[in-house]
């Protein structure tokens, strides 16, 4: 379980905080004894959602992109996540109108994010409002569901207040937070 | 905000920007592709609805 502590974070190697692109890098010691360069970035700027920035984190691929799917064995995952969330906090203190998103696109990541928010509820709620997103599909009057042109269900994201009674077996699809 | 954390944030920002000024060779710009939320929002209407709901929730929660 991740324990967030802003007093115990890695020092940034370098970084940048601005609205177009914010990123920072730090080294995280691995259980193998090596050091892994981790980049935290808020790359997502969608023209349809200009106030929502996705937070990505991971080592770099050879092409320079963040590999957010790789499984790493950090010696101190608490410190890694505390660093990333502190970076998000620093970003939001500059841009209070923005919202940060964490993509729980697979069960491992969603479980991690869910557990992090639940386990650190009081601490994180000092700084952030947490909102989460489920995907819903509309039930039509004819008892069918709304579908896309290819016949697949037309799911739409709906934000909700974080329900802390939801267990890690009932995960959200997307996790968001903004400055309180 | 906790003054100690506030100080930590300022220190954090300062360190990040100082290191940037010191010069880097690798671009910070390459990142990742669109995320799940971005892919689920298909139109301006979808986005407006989502943001209105988000705003209502955060206003109520704050």
Image (cartoon, coloured by chain):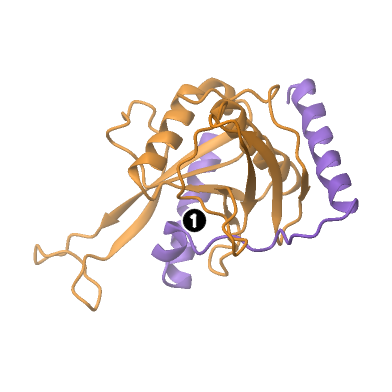
Chain colours: A orange, B purple
Number of labelled discs? 1
Q: Residue B20 location, x and y as percent?
A: 84, 51
Is A112 on the left or on the right of A28, as rendered?
Answer: left
Residue at the extreme bottom: A149
Q: Residue at x 64, y 51 (%)?
A: A41
**Residue plotted at (51% across, 37% down):** A130
Please give the chain letter of the residue carrying mark 1.
B
Q: Nearer the viewer, residue A84 or A29?
A: A29
Which residue does the image show at 63% across and 47% down from the upper left?
Answer: A40
Label 1 SS? helix
* Location of the N terminus of chain A (image quadrant): top left
- Displayed quadrant of residue A145: bottom left
From where the camera sits, is residue A180 visible?
no
Q: Position of residue A11 (x, y in %)?
A: 75, 34
For this view, does A104 lie left or right of residue A130?
Answer: left
For this view, does A65 lie left or right of residue B44?
right
Q: Residue furthest left?
A: A142
Residue at 78 percent across and 28 percent down: it is B8
Q: Which quadrant holds the C terminus of chain A? A: top right
On the image, the x and y values in percent for residue A137 come to 25, 58
Examine the rendered structure and indicate whether residue A60 appears above or below residue A127: below
Count residues near mark 1 (Cα–Cα under 10 Å), then give few for <14, some for 14-19, many for 20+: few
Residue pointed to by mark 1: B52
Q: Percent position (x, y) of residue A24?
A: 71, 47
Depth check, front residue: A16 or B49: A16
Instruction: Say whether residue B45 is left or right of residue A46.
Output: left
């Amino acid at each position: 379980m991740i324990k967030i502590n802003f007093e115990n974070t890695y020092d940034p190697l370098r970084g940048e905080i601005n609205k177009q692109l914010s990123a920072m890098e730090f080294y995280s010691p691995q259980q193998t004894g090596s050091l892994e360069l981790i980049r935290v970035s808020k790359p997502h700027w969608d023209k349809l959602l200009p106030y929502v920035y996705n937070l990505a984190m991971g080592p770099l691929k050879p092409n320079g992109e963040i590999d957010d799917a790789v499984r790493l064995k950090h010696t101190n995952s608490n410190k890694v996540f505390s660093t990333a969330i502190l970076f998000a906090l620093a970003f939001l203190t500059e841009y209070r109108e923005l919202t940060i998103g964490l993509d729980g696109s697979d069960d491992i990541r969603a479980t991690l994010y869910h557990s992090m928010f639940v386990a650190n509820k009081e601490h994180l709620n000092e700084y952030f409002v947490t909102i989460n997103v489920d995907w819903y599909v509309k039930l039509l009057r004819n008892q069918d569901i709304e579908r896309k042109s290819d016949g697949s269900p037309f799911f739409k994201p709906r934000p909700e207040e974080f329900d802390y009674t939801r267990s890690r077996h009932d995960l959200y699809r997307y996790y968001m937070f903004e400055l309180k | 905000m906790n003054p100690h954390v506030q100080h930590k944030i300022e220190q954090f920002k300062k360190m990040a920007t100082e290191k940037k000024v010191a010069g880097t060779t690798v671009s910070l710009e390459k990142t990742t592709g669109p995320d799940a939320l971005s892919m689920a929002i298909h139109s301006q209407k979808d986005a407006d609805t989502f943001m209105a709901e988000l705003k209502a929730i955060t206003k109520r929660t704050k």
